[in-house]
Image (cartoon, helix red, strand yellow):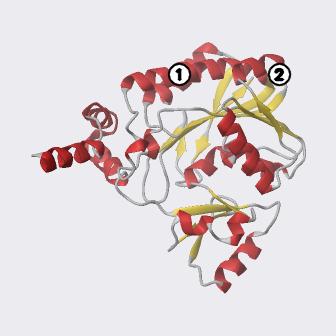
Amino acid sequence: MIQSDSRNNDMRKHSLPTAFTDRLVNQFGRQGSESILASFKMTRATTFRVNTKKATDEDIMNFLRDHNIVYERVKTIPHAFIAKKLSSKEVLALPLCTDGHIYVQGLSSMVPPVILDPKPGETVLDLCAAPGSKTSQMANMMQGKGRLLAIEKDTVRFQKLQYTLNLQGSDFVEQIEGDALRVCKSLHGTFDAILADVPCSAEGRIDLNAPRSFHFWSERNIVAHAKLQRSLLRAAVPCLKPGGRLVYSTCTLAPEENEQMIDWLLTEFPKLKLLPVTSPLTGKPMKNGYCLLPNTKHEGLFVSSLKLR
């Protein structure tokens, strides 16, 4: 009996809540939901980005070939690679990674900066910056020219942000440990571009082999995150210059945090207009935003682009 109870408890720990799977069926249909659930069981490919502050794509490819590491270039995302036969732990142990020449980062995580497309010389805000994956990516895109401000509220996460930017050599990034809701009050009309990659319920990152990736899931958690997201957006939008652009992104599938959030945002700020978004991973255009469903190559993602008229 004890063994049976233990087995049942283990199964429950590795099972998704029925309320969540029911939501997936209602949102994506039976076939779509089954595909998403299957992706939660799979091991995703290990992907990384070249840190152009320290290396070129050719430098990295030479190293990979010299060490017989099988790789694939992701041609639609600049400087992105897939390590074909190495785990993320193995790539993280490579000297290329420990010295900051490459950075292990999911493909879906690389998409929002590509959509925002920060240019050298622009003023750019990373609203919720830790651990610094997208911040350091944008620093490379800006070639160290202009102003890139990164805000993070949580002390531990801020330390991770500092570590990432230091390792990547992104020394021109301004870093503020503080609440974005407060910091943004003094930054109205400042930025050409804002990345609002906000805290979310993280449904697109679920891994059934890691119960901690979904044990916190609840509809109440979705509601709480949506409330926080609205507060962050209320603080961020006034920081745009006229003509400035904002990219909103999450790693969840919940419509309350995605499509419905964009509907709310357009109502709350009538001067915002949607910009067309084309996924660099699929080439598919979407008018209101793009929902990238998780698979073996990447986690789930929602991204939408807007401009202040």
Name the residue beneath numbered marker 1.
263
Relative height, residue 125 to residue 90 (above, below): above
Whichever of labels 2 and 1 marks the residue nearer the N terminus, that label is 2
Number of residue marks: 2
Q: Is residue 261 left or right of residue 22?
A: right
On the image, the x and y values in percent for residue 107 come to 57, 55
Q: Which of the 4 image quadrants contains residue 256?
A: top left
Three-letter code, disc 1: Asp
Q: Crowdedness of circle 1 by 10 Å Cα count: few (<14), some, many (20+)? A: few
Point 74% across, 26% down: residue: 178
Quarter of the rendering containing residue 215: top left
Q: Quadrant of the C terminus?
A: top right
Labelled disc at residue 187? 2
Pair 2/1: label in front = 2
In the displayed structure, would residue 234 be above or below residue 191?
above
Q: CA distance from mark 2 to mark 1?
A: 25 Å
Most foreground residue, 291 or 235: 235
Residue 198 higher or lower than 223, as above or below: below
Could you say whether the residue bearing mark 1 is in a helix, strand or loop? helix
Q: Nearer the viewer, residue 232 or 276?
A: 232
Residue 129 horizontal/vertical position (percent): 69, 38
- What amino acid type should be assigned to the residue bearing mark 2? Leu
Residue 214 in sight here? yes
Indicate left or right for 87 with 295 as reference: right
When the figure is inspected, residue 14 is found, relative to residue 261, above or below; the finding is below
Residue at x-position 27% and y-position 43%:
15
x and y percent of residue 286 in the render? 53, 40
